[in-house]
């Protein structure tokens, strides 16, 4: 139920996806970095690369008492689909030049379960085509905190990745009548 990728931290295996309703769904999240695997409290594997971790997990699948240890990490990017209508349940804080998610009510909007507290909001893209990249908390709230929010996508990034320059893209209009 968990997919791994080669991570940034000394190429340590990093969780890239968790299958919904799998045993580890809600326990681990994308971006967590593998640290060790303990089998039956006796055998400990650490410093495994991705290939050896997957091989070891397959070889020990018959053991019921396997415990993995992870280090909290952030995925580079998470795209979250935002439904139409009012969005409640997310608190943002401006930290230096980054809008950071400091509280997420995962039950308020089902798609919020993918958001990681501490991640920076990189881009807000509305269904109309309007897009804000590198905006402030105030600008983001002006877009999403309205009763008739049209829906769209919010792109979260690892807070340690530098924020891009501020960019606003307006929706493309059909100007075929003009010619």
Image (tube, rainbow, N blue to C red):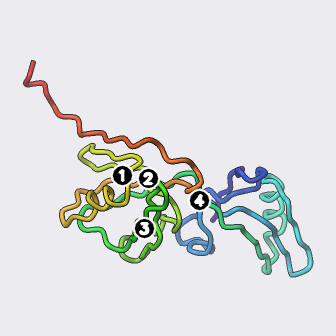
Label whose residue precedes the other's in the sequence (2 or 4): 4
Label whose residue precedes the other's in the sequence (3 or 4): 4
Label whose residue precedes the other's in the sequence (3 or 2): 3
Real-space Cα distance between discs 3 and 4? Answer: 15 Å
Q: Label 1: state its secondary structure.
A: strand
Real-space Cα distance between discs 3 and 1? Answer: 14 Å
Q: Nearer the viewer, mark 3 or mark 1?
A: 1
Residue located farthest toward the top when viewing the structure as drawn: 179
Real-space Cα distance between discs 4 and 1? Answer: 22 Å
Nearer to me, 8 or 109: 8
- Percent across and percent down for residue 140 are 33, 57
Q: Label 2: state its secondary structure.
A: strand
Name the residue that disc number 4 marks. 17
Name the residue that disc number 2 marks. 155
Q: Residue at x 59, y 54 (%)?
A: 160
The answer to whether 160 appears left or right of 67 in the picture is left
Nearer to me, 124 or 174: 124
Do tag 1 and tag 2 residues touch (Cβ < 8 Å)? yes
- Percent across and percent down for residue 179 are 9, 18
Q: Which mark is residue 124?
A: 1
The answer to whether 169 appears left or right of 58 in the picture is left
Q: Label 4: state its secondary structure.
A: strand
Real-space Cα distance between discs 2 and 4? Answer: 16 Å
**Residue 57 higher or lower than 128, as above or below:** below
Label whose residue precedes the other's in the sequence (3 or 1): 3
- Percent across and percent down for residue 149 are 23, 60
Real-space Cα distance between discs 1 and 2? Answer: 6 Å
Residue located farthest toward the right when viewing the structure as drawn: 42
Residue 48 placement: quadrant: bottom right
- Percent across and percent down for residue 56 are 83, 62
Q: Which mark is residue 112?
A: 3
């Amino acid at each position: 139920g968990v997919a791994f990728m080669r991570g940034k931290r000394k190429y340590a295996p990093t969780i890239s996806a968790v299958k919904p309703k799998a045993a580890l769904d809600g326990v681990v999240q994308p971006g967590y970095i593998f640290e060790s695997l303990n089998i039956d409290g006796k055998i400990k594997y650490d410093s495994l690369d991705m290939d050896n971790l997957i091989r070891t997990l397959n070889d020990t699948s018959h053991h019921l008492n396997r415990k993995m240890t992870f280090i909290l990490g952030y995925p580079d990017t998470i795209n979250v689909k935002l439904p139409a209508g009012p969005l409640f349940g997310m608190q943002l804080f401006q930290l230096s030049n980054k809008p950071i998610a400091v509280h997420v009510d995962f039950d308020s909007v089902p798609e919020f379960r993918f958001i990681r507290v501490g991640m920076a909001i990189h881009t807000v893209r509305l269904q109309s085509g309007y897009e804000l990249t590198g905006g402030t908390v105030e600008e983001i709230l002006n877009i999403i905190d309205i009763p008739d929010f049209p829906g769209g996508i919010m792109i979260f990034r690892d807070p340690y990745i530098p924020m891009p320059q501020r960019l606003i893209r307006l929706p493309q209009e059909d100007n075929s009548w003009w010619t």
